[in-house]
Image (cartoon, rainbow, N blue to C red):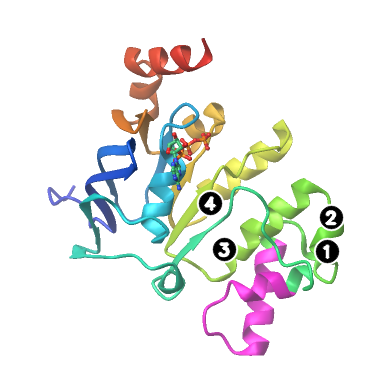
Amino acid sequence: MSTESPAHELALDHITVRFGGLTALDDVSLRVPAGRIVGVIGPNGAGKTTLFNVICGFVTPTAGELTLDGRAWRPRPHHLNRLGIARTLQGVGQFSGLTVLENVQVGIRGGRERQSGKDALAALERCGVAEYAFAPPGALPYAIRKRVELARALASRPRILMLDEPAGGLDADEIQWLAGLIRDAGTTVLLVEHHMDLVMSVCDEILVLDFGKPIALGPPAEISANEKVTEAYLGAAA
Ligand SMILES: Nc1ncnc2c1ncn2[C@@H]1O[C@H](COP(=O)(O)OP(=O)(O)OP(=O)(O)O)[C@@H](O)[C@H]1O
């Protein structure tokens, strides 16, 4: 086995985000190495979405740095696609004036029309929703639209796939299907999710945030046995 550490594809170093008097992220560091599945969990308001927004360039950190492939990086939303980073949205933000297929094509970077159509269809097939290719997304059930949203992100063949609460509103069977898709995605995955079983079953490593602070970082078995983590969730439920 190599003694070298794996290439760190994406890294956050001492990231702090303040919104006025509120510290949404407080000195958060995270390594997302190539090919790993990294989860970010925490009670409501812990800062998970803010962390995603920092990586996507929607929120500029008050302090700290990001690096991509070892180089200092300042993310911009409109550059993500070109860099091979795709993100799903918490809801299902599809354009209602376009068909499902066209929505998925929008996610493909700079492809020729015919090729992007093929890639989009392949992604829909992979997500089990190719039969809806020519339907308007607005008319489809929520679980199908969630699958279309995943297809949209996968169609561009990203090297880093960012999933923002992909299990939200899905039933147990759908979540099981989703777990398989994430495991077989063949890309680096950063997963923000409330559904603990999903996170525990697919992630190599999990970061736990509580009121913006990183309280634990480690493999699933370590996280589920961590007292601070249990306390944070119990406190949030009280
Ligand atoms: N643009 C903003 N302006 C002011 N406060 C914000 C902004 N975005 C987030 N916050 C606050 O920052 C904190 C962290 O919010 P964030 O949405 O990142 O948490 P979260 O862990 O994603 O929560 P949830 O699980 O409920 O989605 C919250 O207190 C939230 O109200």
> Left of 31 or right of it: where is 107?
right
Q: Which residue is mark 3?
A: 154
Tell me if mark 1 has few (under 14), some (14-19) or many (20+) residues whose alpha carbon lies within 10 angstroms of its own: some
Q: Residue 140 bears which disc, if any?
A: 2
Pick whichever of labels 4 and 1 is earlier in the sequence: 1
When asked about the image quadrant of residue 188, the answer is: bottom left
Identified by mark 3, the residue type is Leu
From the Cβ of disc 3, is ligand 1 less than 8 Å away? Answer: no
> Residue 138: x and y, percent?
82, 59
Per the rendered image, the range of residues in magenta is 102-125
Q: Nearer the viewer, residue 211 or 32?
A: 211
Q: Is residue 1 above or below residue 208?
A: below
Closest to the camera, between mark 4 and mark 3, is 3
- Dot placed on the residue nearer the N-terminal end, 2 or 4: 2
Q: Secondary structure at mark 3?
A: helix
Q: Nearer the viewer, residue 38 or 98?
A: 98
Distance from label 1 to label 3 (Cα)?
17 Å
Determine whether, in the image, residue 144 is placed left or right of residue 14: right
* First-in-chain label (2 vs 1): 1
CA–CA distance between discs 4 and 3?
A: 12 Å
Q: Taking 145 as reference, is 85 above or below it? A: below
Query: What residue is drawn where x is 31% and y is 45%?
Result: 17
Q: Which residue is mark 4?
A: 184
